[in-house]
Image (spheres, rainbow, N blue to C red):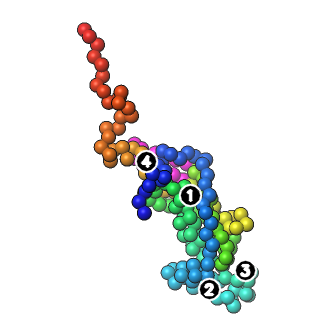
Amino acid sequence: MSYTAMHLYFDDVQVGQEWESLGRTVTEADIVNFAGISGDFNPIHVDHEFCKTTVFRRPIAHGMLVLAMGSGLGLMCPPIRTLAFMGIKEWKFLEPVFMGDTIRMRTKILEKQERSRGKRGVITWQRWIVNQHNKIAEEGIMVTLVEGRARRTQESGSNGLDSEAEAQEPETKPS
């Protein structure tokens, strides 16, 4: 996927802004496929009979699966020109997610730090993954590197000046 005009730059967002993604329903296929990819076949995720003996009474989605799904939901929440995922400062698994649950990602900007004279910036995000009952299943703080508008200006060959008036040579006073 390439960036489009709707994808925001670092400069376009402010600390305190919030977004909420569309929903995504977790399926049994999601859980089984994640178990296969990750190698995590813990019976709490894949053994219906075993799960009947647990506090959950049925299989639960892997916490890391829900985190990965949240990452995908966050891709357009907001649509932003992410250059790199830099890290997770903290992450908590608060509630189980079951097959059939619909999750959404809520996002809030906590901090912005400009880098490389505006070519990019670091954004610290608070993220919540909520279920269909608005209960927070997972939450934490993540950090990304985002493209800034100065990068676009330099790539297009502009001299970085903001207006034609600034581009003109300075006036000389008659002597």
SS under mark 2? helix
Please report whichever mark, 3 or 4, sits nearer to the chain's N-terminal start: 3
For label 1, the residue is: 77
Crowdedness near tag 4: few (<14), some (14–19) or many (≥20) residues, C-alpha within 10 Å? many
Question: Do labels 4 and 2 touch, CB within 8 Å?
Answer: no
Picture coordinates of residue 87, whole percent (x, y) = 50, 61
Q: Is residue 64 left or right of residue 55?
A: left
Q: Is residue 122 shown in magenta?
A: yes
**Residue nearer the viewer, 89 or 104:** 104
* Residue type pointed to by label 1: Cys
**Residue drawn at the location 46% of the way across and 49% of the way down:** 9
Quadrant in the picture for residue 89: bottom right
Question: Do labels 3 and 4 touch, CB within 8 Å?
Answer: no
Q: Is residue 151 shown in magenta?
A: no
- Using the numbered discs, state the Cα–Cα distance from disc 2 to disc 1 in whole angstroms: 31 Å
Q: Is residue 2 left or right of residue 109?
A: left
* Residue type pointed to by label 4: Gly
For label 2, the residue is: 46
Please report whichever mark, 2 or 3, sits nearer to the chain's N-terminal start: 2
Specify the segment rendered in magenta: 111-124
Residue 65, label in figure: none
**Residue drawn at the location 63% of the way across and 72% of the way down:** 25
For label 3, the residue is: 56
Q: Looking at the picture, does residue 29 appear above or below residue 104?
A: below
Quadrant in the picture for residue 20: bottom right
The mark lying in front, picked from 2 and 1, is: 1
Crowdedness near tag 2: few (<14), some (14–19) or many (≥20) residues, C-alpha within 10 Å? many
For label 4, the residue is: 148
Q: Looking at the picture, does residue 44 appear above or below residue 82?
A: below
